[in-house]
Image (spheres, rainbow, N blue to C red):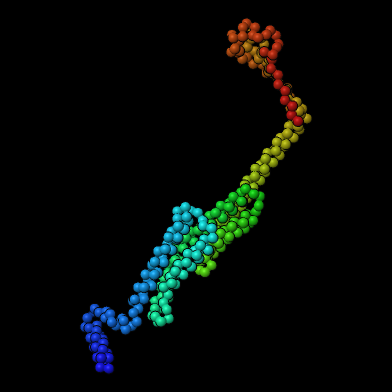
Amino acid sequence: MRNCIFSLAAISSIGGTAAWSSQSSSVVNPPPSFVLAIRGGANEYETKFESAKCTVLEKASRKIEDARRKIVDEGTTITDFGSKADEICTAAIEEFAKSAPSEAEGSSASSAYARKLQELESGLDAPLQVLYLRQLSILREQALSSYKSASKASQASDYEAMLAADSQFLRGAESATRKSSTWTYDSERSALQSVMSDFASTTKKLTETQVQSSQQQSTAMQFLQHQQQMIQQLQQQLYGQSSPWNMGCAYRIPDTNFNLQGSYQQGRANFQLSCVPDEYAPMLGPNGFSNGVGPGNLGLSLNLSI
């Protein structure tokens, strides 16, 4: 009994000395180790569970690194990434649970175990969620590429192509999401739908511009045809009914520089006499290829307009 009173008096004396020291100096001395032992040895449990947590994280980080290499470095997706992420987390938690405290170790051990378990879950979920968001980005680009290809290659409407691309992204996103987590792909899906809507709007405007340009060209051609018809009508009124026959002929008089040309076009005849030196006469001899009218010095042309 005297020993217990002496121990309590010693503790009270130490506490009073520490309180006086805190008033006279800004430096606060930590409590002695035997005081921590009286409190339940919380540091001992913290160290124990921290060591177990680090060991489990080190093993799980190898699997996470393999997934990171495929998604980030190679730019490919992992099939059923959500299920595989759940397997990594479940295996790590089960291994950490082997170091769970017993009921005899008290509430201090249970509290330290719960804190380290929460830290373990956060340490596993954070890098896996980063890979999840990266895979969603890859899935979004693949769906957008499929939408562009479908809208160009087929006669289907943009709405049907958008539905197919959205379904493709939805299947990949659902398989990549952890079931027991707060992961969501709503923002990536909304971004994909927004990009597809903007692309469809741009394509529609381009198509409308092309159609409008074609209509303007067609209107211009119709105007020119109408003007041509009016010119033909005026010609008929001035010169009468024109003939559909168009003819022309040319004749060079042998051993001379005279060239005769005649033409008949739209009911009118035209004759022309010109003096054009024959540059090739010295090469053909005194009489050229033939004497008189022949294929060598007579040209004919015929044009029939209907």
Residue 113 in view in this figure: yes
Q: Farthest residue toward the right?
A: 241
Determine which quarter of the picture holds residue 113.
Answer: bottom left
Q: Is residue 289 above or below residue 215?
A: above
Residue 239 in the image: state x and y as whole percent: 75, 29
Q: Is residue 35 above or below residue 249?
A: below
Q: Farthest residue toward the left?
A: 24
34 or 182: which is nearer to us? 34
Residue 202 in view in this figure: no
- The number of callouts visible is 0
Which residue is painted at 55% across and 54% down in the image?
A: 142
Which residue is painted at 64% across and 47% down in the image?
A: 211
35 or 21: which is nearer to us? 35
Residue 201 in the image: state x and y as whole percent: 59, 55
Residue 102 in the image: state x and y as whole percent: 42, 79
Which residue is painted at 31% across and 81% down in the image?
A: 37
Which residue is painted at 50% across and 65% down in the image?
A: 87
Left or right: residue 52 versus residue 212 is left
